[in-house]
Amino acid sequence: MSSATTNPPVAALGVGSIISESFSILFRHLGPVLVLSLGPTLLGIVISGLLNGWNEALGVAEPTAPDGGYFVRAGIDTIVQLVLSGVTTALMVQMAYDAKLQRPLRLGAYFGPALSAAVPIAILGLAGGILTVLGMIALIIPGLWIYAVFSMMPAAVVIEKVGFGGLSRSANLTKDYRWPIVGAIILLVIIAAVIGFVAMFLVGIFLGTTGFSGVGLVVGILVLGLVSAIGAALGSISVALIYARLREIKEGASVQDIAAVFD
């Protein structure tokens, strides 16, 4: 007589509650969020504008035809944006845990870990991005699935200090939960796209009236910076919460355990 064995049910990730809590943290702490994310975002826009022109940097014109220095400028811009994005993500991941635990936000204390994690996040982000693009070339869904595989890399680098092992750590954490993560990514992309479209539309109208100089340019940079900073913060907070949920499901780690590495 043989006995059948059954695998225990896989705990739900809870995408809806994670997205809802991400928005809650974002709006409850909008001031600190902008303090942490707006600086790197504005710096990225300014550097992109200086390298590629303000039309392209502000998204109100199509990229110009490549010239002799195009690929050099594009390479520099990509590296800068990856590093700044890494800093923003590392800052927001730390803030998200303090906010979730309802602890006082320690803005100054976030910068040390963020700066030390920025370079690994940037390099691994480039590697993961290349793999994602290759998946997108095949079909959109495989690309999103590959992105989900490596999506926990920034949190793993910041929290666990795994350095360049971040991609493999993310792959292990996301196993069995990649499709729910894809669902979360699609929701966030749709939300960010709607907000970004409205912002670009308003910036385009404003700059069409004032031109790309003086007050018009400054206002355009600020508006795009604010929208981009909020979008980046929302994505980073969501990553932090998904990472915490995966650690809870797979390793029994609480948010208090995760956040304790910064105490």
Image: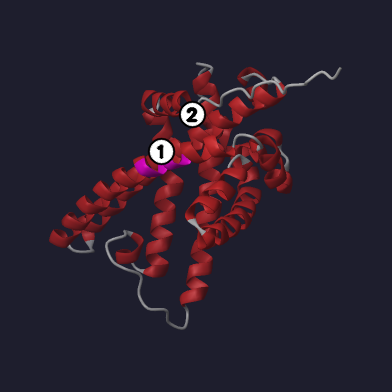
- At a point 53% along the width and 68% down the height, the residue shown is 75
Which residues make up the magenta segment? 185-190
Q: Verify CB contact (< 8 Å) between mark 1 and mark 2.
A: yes
Labels 1 and 2: the sequence-earlier one:
2
138 relative to 195, above or below = below
Amino acid at dot 2: Val
Q: Does the magenta stretch include residue 204?
A: no
Mark 1 lies on residue: 187
240 relative to 259, above or below = below
108 relative to 196, above or below = above
Pinpoint residue 60: horizontal percent, then vertical percent.
27, 62
Pinpoint residue 104: horizontal percent, then vertical percent.
50, 18
Looking at the rendered structure, the secondary structure element under dot 1 is helix
Q: Which colour scheme is used?
A: secondary structure
The reply, left or right, for residue 119 in relation to residue 199 is right
Position of the N terminus, as image quadrant, is top right
Instruction: Rate crowding at label 1 as few (under 14), some (14 to 19) or many (20 or more) other CA atoms within 10 Å.
Output: some
Mark 2 lies on residue: 15
The reply, left or right, for residue 71 in relation to residue 191 is right
Q: Is the magenta stretch mostly helix, strand or loop?
A: helix
